[in-house]
Image (cartoon, coloured by chain):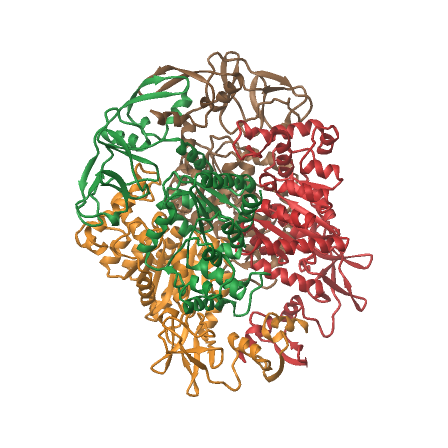
Chain colours: A red, B green, C orange, D brown
């Protein structure tokens, strides 16, 4: 029955641990494992539980923004800490954070938000990942993530995203969009505008370029110097985006340009009109920037994280930069859809640890059009 | 006015030739050029005309399938030969062929079709490329080809292809499709079926895998082992395509399977039912193959070329192999659309000399759906 | 201990089967499974053994080239058939074949080689996949295959291939190379020449274009119209490959051109000089072709398969077409290395079932150079 | 002589302008053009000169950071302004800026650096692009940029970059490197270390991730959780980069970690030891960040621009984000080499207007190794 041994290969069980069967039914097998401390920690990291739970070890932070050397580094997965004899949920779960206590409750915080002297969980004792039903679902996503390929029906994938969007709305959760500027060139921004008006957009997280290209398209009919109407390169088109930036700077902000009646169409106009919050995070390549772009990235990251609270679905459209940013901030319980024509982008998102991402390799313009047709008309 | 010199850069004019203005109007500039023989030949290859046309030089083919060493190697472009004091169109224009005379008419033939002793045009005298209105159009395509990018609106590109299809039909010319097997996985084959029934498909040029996956999808509901309905991997799915092949082999051919009532749906069924001709060219990677697959490539190339006669539009869907094959056989006057999610494929087609190709980087499933919506419903 | 249940997820054990522990030591766990016929077959396909082995079911082939409908479709993996009370190795293991008996020995054959009336194994009884040490190794490759990424050190991967090449040579097995024409443009063909002279090339499987571009580079200094020396586009360069083809046609074959003293350098010259066999399989896109190119694909597939006998390592360089062809013909016990700058190519090879492939995403010119440096100098 | 008319296609000359020959020699053609104001402006933008130069039109900036609506938007190209009867070079040439006067000298500044009331050049009169010898060279690069392809010899391209590096050093100009974190995973960072020690690195512009992965590799032997030595996934590897960040935060900075003797190897160590300046620009996806990472992007852009002063060669390694940032800041006279395994990255850089970029599609690890071999040993 050697195949079964295969099933353990790659797990810590195969390297020196001894085990015994604790319970065996027709559908369940419980094993007891005896092993050295390191293997035990590895097993805990995999989701095994400890027989005799040991209390977590807290150490004081040595300085502001600095954790003790052996701090527990968090993952996406829902996590619990053993406090006062029971497993307590961690708040604000995110990746690459550490665990502290606020009002006797375990909370996930970023390294830079640590205060000197505050308790930080170290080692792997008294902490566990929770394997609940929503994680089962994310397992399914993990399968999809490994399976990123243009050789899958975009139709099947559209339906999956439509289901997730309906479920998020039914649950009263937010649908957060993370679009890159390419949505303007591909026509997806017009579709997103329609979705915004129909109530399918609760928040938009992006950067300077999205807003610039969207406004350029409204005012000068171009995007990256190319006519939005017929795809022709326009004379002087390369300077159009600078004119758009300058004009918004003259107004003071995008909402001011809308209020002045100067910006009358497009995605950004639609977000302002429908009071849908957006965050434009700056980047080293930004021209201008628009007054609305947040060039202080500490603030931008905090604003992103704020918008992601209560999200039931996050949809990344053709932007690796902002997509990875969002992926890091998000609990693994929130479905994350990443649409891109480059397979490498979805792969990269998965490589960074966002294993719950659904990677969809397709034309973003046509895909968002299908989403809109099904969400609004279907 | 140094910019003008720029416009000549890269042309033979910049290296040692002298020139004079022959005629100058508000919109035309005729230059006379004096240069050595090699430069003259280069200029002729570029489309310049000779002042005093020299008769073409014909040499006898030294053996069957072998041209004289200095044979004129043809391009896509419409070509004329100086015969009896006038420019005569070359028949059967194709790339990488040579020129012979049949019944006193210049004809383009493949190397392997040369007969020993037949006259083959050598050198560059007495032959010219014709620059007519349809070539102007192909210039526009050339622009698109260099501009292959997913950052262009698929909608604009869809419209362009719809226009070309309508124009071909209005001209009584054929619309030839060259799809790869990926159209089954992406759902484009269902759309192509609808287009076939509506009269938008005059011929299909492909290979073994397209038919196998299409028939697999009808009989066993899978394509490459993946469920066509929900994208799940099916147990034993990897053997399904072999079962489909075996069953067609038992019938003797695809039409026989249709006639026996055993194949009742799908693209191949639809082609048989609508009497639309198809050619399945074999490849070294083919399993089986289907009895309908032509494994003798001399025959397959001839059958492809036969189907391409009278084509007014050729649409390549996600197949570099068959796409390049078709590109080589085709006159540059026929618009060639190449749809693929991999930018490298369209680039490669252009690199091979099919400069008149329109490269469209998009999801082939969603793109053919949009084509169908606009051609049939729009 | 729910994690263990996880380890079974995706296996047939989780769906309705009951099981009991047969044997449990500190490092091994043998399970007995009771399940319905279908699940049993699924488990057999996974590598489980049957308690009471049942004899295989043979049915007569209904016609030449046609298997009984429920034929067992083979995989890459080493397979055994239960004959006369013992497990007997299958000869000529390959993917997508079926099993017959020749001289009382089970043999893997292609569908088209079936003779009417010969016994063909059907169903899943009395056949098993063998899980031996070489398969363990291929498991490691499988890991790499899923892990195709340019973000891995080419150096680590070079070392791995060097080790495999040395091991193949130590075992007296062949090293078979499957290069695409791009190796000429990237300079890898010069490196392969050096490897050929040093005895690291036992066979070359490719197509018309490889030989054409190699010979074009020797005679006219270009490849695809681009100078091999300095990367510049040459005037008339596009016709060079046709001149090279014509000249070889005049000689009658590549070896004849070498013997005549006309082809004095390059990869093909080196293969001829060192008496290294090569097969050039035709394709629908081939110009010419060279007289050495086999345009009858039945013959070409047989010649490929013949060269692959005794292979201990197969290295595919930048060619999906020939790579998939070879992958289909090869037993899973032979390591298969696929080097390509496009991640999609390695993915596609894996998708086709060549799970034992090592996918290396890198520049093929620089990679083969590193291989040569380490194999010959290191 | 219709080919010549072709050479004008796409230029404003073809649409309604009349022209006459002013001067014609064997190698030069000067045309006089009469056209409407808009066409004149288009021609000026193309590099044509005005017969009667008109003085530039300056308008006062309406507010801090805001230009007059019709401001002249700068390009990469070397630019001159007509001042006091002569053409004066513009200082600090960069893309997407505007032109002002400082001490009676025309200077290129960013929109956000405009002061209310300062003179800003508007329209296209009295400003011209200069076509000098270094631009001829950049033309050659432009050709390469359009010709981005993995089907070119990396060797030829290596030699070209080696020549540019030697030329920059001979001219006393800086060689600035813009590497992404992938250089750690591919082994290119070790090569860059050697180049840094040998004096071929004058400045490094990158982001948080490069330094994190480099230091992670030194301290914990991993990069993105993967062993640097043998490519295996390490247990807990995903948290290693957070431990590296935390440890540097405890030290206060990377130089402090080096000084404390805690960071003893790697690229960042080497930069500190050799007093080579580096700028780490923050991004929305950054974890930590390191104390050395500048999260205020106004400051980061200024620091980048400062380092680029005096650059004679800029080499971008596998980072689109920082590469585009640098491309925007750079005069077109500085050669810009962009090495990436993804063709889309080089294309995107060119699309953004960095037409003087040499795009090299190759494996960055092997490529920088070849560079190092040739620059140091060769």
As drawn, is C212 to the left or to the right of C355?
left
Above or below, comparing residue B167 to residue C307 in the picture: above
D216 or C302, which lies in front? C302
- Residue occupying the point 48% across, 61% down: B213
Residue C95 visible here: no
Instruction: Classify residue D61 by image quadrant.
Output: top right
* Side of A75 where C148 appears, left or right: left
Does residue A254 appear to the left or right of D37 in the view shown? Answer: right
Residue at x-position 47% and y-position 76%: C129
Number of numbered discs overlaid on the protein picture: 0
- Residue D44 vs D94, above or below: the answer is above
Image quadrant occupied by the C terminus of chain C? bottom left
Q: Position of residue D51 (x, y in %)?
A: 46, 13
Quarter of the image that includes the N terminus of chain C: bottom right
Image spot of residue C182 (x, y percent): 37, 50
Q: Nearer the viewer, residue B314 or C151?
A: B314
The reply to whether residue A275 is in sight is yes
Where is residue C111 drawn, in percent x and y?
A: 39, 70
Where residue C191 appears, as percent x and y from the top left, is 33, 53
State whether residue C37 is above or below residue D120. Answer: below
Q: Quadrant of residue B349?
A: top left
Residue at 58% x, 16% y is D57
């Amino acid at each position: 029955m050697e195949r079964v041994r295969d099933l353990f290969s790659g797990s810590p069980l195969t390297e020196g641990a001894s085990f015994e069967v604790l319970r065996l039914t027709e559908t369940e097998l419980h094993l007891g494992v005896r092993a050295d401390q390191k293997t035990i920690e590895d097993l805990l990291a995999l989701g095994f539980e400890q027989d005799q739970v040991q209390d977590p070890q807290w150490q004081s932070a040595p300085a502001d923004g600095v954790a003790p050397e052996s701090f527990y580094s968090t993952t996406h997965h829902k996590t619990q800490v053993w406090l006062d004899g029971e497993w307590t949920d961690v708040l604000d779960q995110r990746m690459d954070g550490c665990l502290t206590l606020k009002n006797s409750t375990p909370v996930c915080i970023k390294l830079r938000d640590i205060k000197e002297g505050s308790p930080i969980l170290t080692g792997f004792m008294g902490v566990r990942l929770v394997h609940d039903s929503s994680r089962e679902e994310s397992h399914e996503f993990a399968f999809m993530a490994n399976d990123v390929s243009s050789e899958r029906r975009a139709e099947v994938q559209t339906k999956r995203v439509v289901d997730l969007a309906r479920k998020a709305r039914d649950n009263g959760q937010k649908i957060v969009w993370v679009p890159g500027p390419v949505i303007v060139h591909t026509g997806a921004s017009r579709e997103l505008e329609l979705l915004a008006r129909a109530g399918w957009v609760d928040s938009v997280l992006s950067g300077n370029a999205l807003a610039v290209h969207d406004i350029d398209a409204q005012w000068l009919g171009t995007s990256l110097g190319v006519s939005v109407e017929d795809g022709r390169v326009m004379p002087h088109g390369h300077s159009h985006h600078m004119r758009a930036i300058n004009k918004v700077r003259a107004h003071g902000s995008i909402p001011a340009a809308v209020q002045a009646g100067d910006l009358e169409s497009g995605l950004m106009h639609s977000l302002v009109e429908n009071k849908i919050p957006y965050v434009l995070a700056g980047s080293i390549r930004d021209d201008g920037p628009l007054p609305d772009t947040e060039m202080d990235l500490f603030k931008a990251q905090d604003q992103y994280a704020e918008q992601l609270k209560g999200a039931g679905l996050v949809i990344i459209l053709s932007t690796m930069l902002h997509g990875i940013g969002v992926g890091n901030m998000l609990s693994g319980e929130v479905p994350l859809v990443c649409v891109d024509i480059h397979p490498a982008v979805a792969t990269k998102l998965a490589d960074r640890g966002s294993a719950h991402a659904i990677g969809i390799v397709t034309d973003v313009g046509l895909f968002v059009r299908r989403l809109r047709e099904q969400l609004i008309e279907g």
